[in-house]
Each structure stands twice: as structure tokens, then as C-alpha cells.
Image (cartoon, helix red, strand yellow):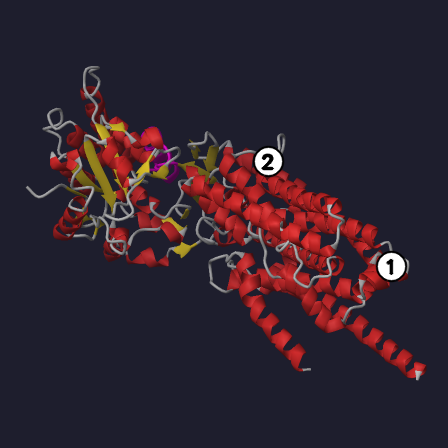
Amino acid sequence: MTLTRPLLAALALIASFGSAVADVVATDILGRVVHLPEPARHIVLGEGRHLTVLGLIHDDPVSLVTGWRLDKALDEPTMQAYREKFPDIDEIRPVGSGNRDISAEAIIALHPDLVVLTLIDQGDPGMEVARQQIEAAGIPVAYVDFFSHPQENSIPSLQILGKLIGAEERAEEFADFYEARLARIRDRLAAPDITRPRVFFHVHAAPQSCCSTVGTGVFHDFITTAGGQNIGNDTVKGVLGNVSLEYLIGADPDVYIATGGTHMAVRGGLVLGSGVDADTAQASFDKLISAPGFSSLRAVEEGRVAGVWHLFNDSPVHIALIEYLAKTFHPDLFQDVDPAATLAEINARFLPVTVPGTWWVTPEQ
Amino acid sequence: MSDAILQRYHRQSRRNALLVGVLALAALAALLLDLVTGPAGLPLADTLRALTGGEVTRGTQVIVWDVRLPVACMALLVGAALALAGAEMQTVLENPLAEPFTLGVSSSAALGAAVAIVLGLTVPGLPPVWSVSGNAFLFALGALGLLQLLGRIRGGGPEVLILFGVALNFTAAALLSLLQFVASADALQQLVFWTMGSLASAQWPGVVLIGVVLVVAVPFSFRAAWKLTALRLGEDQAKSFGVDVTGLRRWTLLRVSLLAASAVSMVGVIGFVGLAGPHIARMLVGENHRVFLPASLLTGALVMSLASTLSKTLVPGVLLPVGLVTSLIGLPIFFALILRGRRR
């Protein structure tokens, strides 16, 4: 150790001289300056889902990724859709080490030219050690965030990735597209006299064991931006928490939104998302809102209710969800807004692969 | 007649010394095995060259020196500390079930970790990387301090200490559950992994710390060996040899506290080693603490070192929590040893 420390310091010094002439310099979401000698071509993703984010700014994201933390990589229908176009996706090496940690050794052995971590990893002691070891091996690490603070950080994070892989123009193009849509929502909700409906957000929704809801974080931000008041924020401290069915009925929300995904099939809950057809989604949603307790909610009786895909988080594609929520909360204000068209445009203009699925559902008319 | 007994004693001593030597070599071999295995699949020659200071790539250098070596050393030292602590605890508490786990040290350490992870309350001035370990250490030490204090009030007999230990265990476990209940999803996940025991975040300062604790504690342990052997014959017997049993118990528990608390705080909850390490050693060399204590220490080191290797090789690409490996892999071997021992 006593010998390696000065050696590493010397190497770091040499590296910093080298960086003075580096082609690629970016400031990551934590404000750390990341130097690359040239745009990254062998990336390790600390968050597997970010492959689809790279897809927004690169025609062949699979070719850029050498390794990923597998436990939260893409869901099977998404994997399948990517695999059809990019068979090499199965060559991406897993670098996970248990559920949340990553293996510094596995990463260093892959000789990547960039490791992308997500903001949630910051502060986790295990990840900090791994990051130090990776950087000691001369591999740059950049932090991005599409999850913790999606609205403030998504576009800057996309721009950081754009810089690091040499796709700044594509990133700017998406940023313009995203910000124009976000601005439209914010402008129309700017009037002070708009009543913001009280929204209950039931996450991972199932008819039994009511109800997980969100206090702060991702979905809370989406609700607020879309012009709603998150009533979970009054009771739940932190990102996720549980309330009882009695609480929900007593709270009498104006709007009830359930989230679900294919993972809810085993729990008899709301099934929708990638690879799910409209009929399946409709059937599981109808079962949910006709369950005792839920069916008697005023929001359900008045039809101010919807189910949305839970995994809109961790990608700037969430702009479509924000539009959908805005339209549900304020149908009059956003009559002309079409979130399905937004998704279609993202698929057509940006993403290399279109994943089939059902992303939202309302009661049958 | 007495000649025969003496001869048998000498033969046994030689055999025991040999066994301790074999254990030491085995532990060393396990350490080497731990150093040359890993998900990177480095060629053996490269690993050895990196270890001996030869010419290797920077990546290999970092993998061997910064990733593998601290983990391997940590495994060895933690195993040694836990097993030695367990061995001494079993003797002074006259109970074969005594170990850091049963006396509430592990759950108290976990409670300390939870206070850091969930509530964010840490020792002021400690760097964030150390906050969890620091809290775990304080709580573990606090638990054993409390145990000593309560024991002294009630006379400090072994049954009283064990009962207080068990009560402390449940108290810490209940408070831990309470914190888990209010924890956020992220914090809960971190906490659950911590309680499974992990070597993944082993770092040099931690290795040095636990090394220092061992270097300080071991000479005292070995010096107390004959008194502990005497105590093993029964408290009255030991007193008749002139052993100050109360003093012996107090000092031993203090030593053991330091060993157990520093080990648990570094790597989280590791089952099996503190309990079974000493028992395996006992089956091998018997009750004479002059060989039993070093044999326990080496058995613990050997078991943890092997567990460390297994935890990264059992499921390729995944680092299994080492606490699970010690228990799940170690217990069948332990069962077998007990059964064989009974038949003899």
C-alpha cells in the first residue's frame, strides 16, 4: 500500500496532464469532470436500463455497451425486441455482484473506456469502494440520473452521455423535443387559478393489501408537474410507503392512478407494459377497480381513474407519461395533447427499436 | 505407569503442534487460493507477477492489490478474530453455545449499522465511508459493555451473563426490526445486505484496524491460556489452582468484545465461524487452551478464507454474501464432524 499510493498518485498526475489535450470533457451530474481521450466505445452500465437511454442518441446502442449490471437490465419483451435487431446484446457481460453492488474486478477486466453509474449509487459505501477501485485502474466514471430527480436531471444527463459518446447533436435534438413538450405543460398550468386535483397514486397496484403509494421522488414530481396534488405526500415520508384501504376511502381523492407492470401478474394486480396486449391490460385494470373498496371510490365512480406502466421511470421517455397524467388531471386544458403520438414520435425519430406493449389503460366506455 | 502417561502426553503434544502447523499452512494456502480466483479470470502467472511486484498492466495491478488483497486479508483476519472470540467466550461462560451471535453482539452491531443507514445518525467527524462500520463497532462494544455491567450487578456468573446476552440479542433484534419497518426501500435493501455479511467493501484501513486489534489481543489470550484450561475443569477447580476467576472472566470478555466488535463492524453479520470454528478446533486438538486457542484462530481464518473464495466462485459473476456461505457450506461439514465425533 505504501508503495502503490505514490505510484497511483503519479499515474493520476500523468493522466491529468494527458487530459489537458483530451478530446472529450464532460461534467457529470455530480459536478465531477470526466475526461476521455476519445468518445467512449466500450461502456459499462451500472444501470442496465440505460441501454435504451443510449438508444435515444445512438443508432446501435448495443455496440457501445461491453458490460452491465444485470439484475435490473431490460425486461424480457424489451430484451427480445432489441435482440431481434442487435443479436450481440447477449454478448454484453454481466458485472453485477449481488443485487445492488457491482464487481470492480469484473469491470476492470473488461477494459472499458467509460463506466456510467447512476445517482442512487452515490453514497452507497459498497459502490463508493468499487468506484475508487475502478478509477484507480484508470477507467473514468461518470454519474447520470434519470431516476432520482428525473425532471431536473434527465436532459442534463442525456447531454452528458451525448458528449461522452460523441453524439451531442442527437442529444440536443432530443432535448429540444423534450423541453418543448414540458414547456407546453408548464405554460398551460402557469395560471394561478387552476385547481389542482387531489391525486392518489397507487403503485404496484393489486386489489388485495391496499396500498403502496409515493411520498416524494419520481412519481411525486411527475404528478406535480402534470398539475396534480399528490395526497400520498401528506402521509408518506420518503419515496414509498403504505396506507390502508380505509385511509384511501377516507381521503376521497379526485383522481385515482394505479401503476403496474408484468411483475404484478403473480400478485393478481395490474398487468401492463412491454409485451402486454390491450385486452390483458384492460381485464386486469377492470378487476382492480371493481374490487371491494376501490369500486366505491368517488374517483372511480366519476371515471377519473387510469392505470399506467410503472417502468416509465429511468428514461426521459417519461415525458409521455407526464403528458398522459396532465391530460387525465386537466382534460380541458390538454385536449389537443396526444401522449400516444409523443411515444410514437420518440420511437420513429429517436429509438432504434420499437417495443410493443400497452402503456396506459382507462375504464371501458 | 506415570512414564506411559507422560509419553502419551508428549506424543499428543507433538501431534497437536503438528496439527496447528498444518492448520496454519492450510490457512495460508486458502489465502493464496482466494488471491488467485476472481471474476476477471486473470492468468495465474499475471496474478503472481502482480503479487511479487512484477511488470503487469495497471488493471491487473489494481485487481490484485486493491480489489482482491484487502478482501482476502479481511476474510482471514475476521475469521481468526471471530473464532478466537468464540473460543474464549465458550470457556469463560462455560457454555458451548456462546459466541458473538448468541450474546447479542452481532444484532447490536446490525442495529448500529441500521441507525447509520436508516436514520443517518453517525459518529461526528467520521468520514462517510466509515459511518456504518463506526456505528456497528460502537453498538457492538456497547452491547458487551452493558453485558459486563449487568453481569457485575448480578454477580457475574456465567448463567447470568448468558441470560443477559440472550435478552440483549432480542432487544437489539426488536429495535432493528422497528428501524427496518420505518426504513425507505433503498435503505432497507442496504441494511438487509449488511446483515448478510459482505467482504465486498473491505478496504486497507479496515484490514489494518482489525489486524492491530488481533496483534494486541492475541498475546493476552495466549498468556491466559493455562488459566482458561483450568477454568474448563470447573470454576471451583480453577479457584483451587489460585485462578482469580472473576478477574479472568472480566478481562477475557473485554478482549473478546474488542475482537468480536471490530470483526462484525467491518463485514456485517457472519454466522457459524464464531460458534463452529472453536468446536472444530476442539475436535481436532482437545481442551488444552495453549493449542486450542491458536487452533481455533487458525480454523476460523481457514473457514472464512475458503468461504471468501466460494462466495465469488459458486455463482459466476455474483458475489454471494459471505455470511450465507459460511453458514450454508460450513454447517454440513460441522454436522458431519459432530456425528463422526459421537461415534468414536
User: Considering the image in quadrants, where does the N terminus of chain B appear?
Assistant: bottom right
Is B155 on the left or on the right of A262, as rendered?
right
Identify the element where label 1 is drawn. helix
Sort mark 1 into few (<14), some (14-19) or many (20+) by Cα contacts within 10 Å. Answer: some
Q: What predominant SS class does the magenta segment belong to?
A: helix
- The quadrant in which residue B302 appears is bottom right
Q: Which mark is residue A13?
A: 2
What amino acid is found at the position of numbered circle 2 in the picture? Leu
Which residue range is magenta in the image? A145-167
Is A340 on the left or on the right of A352, as rendered?
left
Q: Nearer the viewer, residue B291 or A131?
A: B291
What amino acid is found at the position of numbered circle 1 in the picture? Lys
Q: Nearer the viewer, residue A77 or A17?
A: A77
Q: Return the x and y of residue B40 as percentages of the image width and height.
A: 51, 58
Identify the element where label 2 is drawn. helix
Distance, label 1 to label 2, CA atoms, is 65 Å
Q: Return the x and y of residue A323 as percentages of the image width and height.
A: 19, 32
Q: Return the x and y of residue A297 as percentages of the image width and height.
A: 18, 37
| Outermost residue, left side | A365
Which residue position is annotated with label 1?
Answer: B239
Q: Which mark is residue B329?
A: none
- Which residue is depicted at the point 62% across and 46% down? B265
Q: In the rendered structure, the residue with mark 2 lies on which chain?
A: A
Give yes or no for contact between labels 1 and 2 (Cβ–Cβ under 8 Å). no
- The quadrant in which residue B55 appears is bottom right
Asked if B281 appears above or below A135 in the picture, the reply is below
Q: Nearer the viewer, residue A254 or A146?
A: A254
Task: Inspect this view and state whether residue B183 appears.
Answer: no
Asked if A97 appears above or below A6 in the picture, the reply is below
| Outermost residue, top side | A192
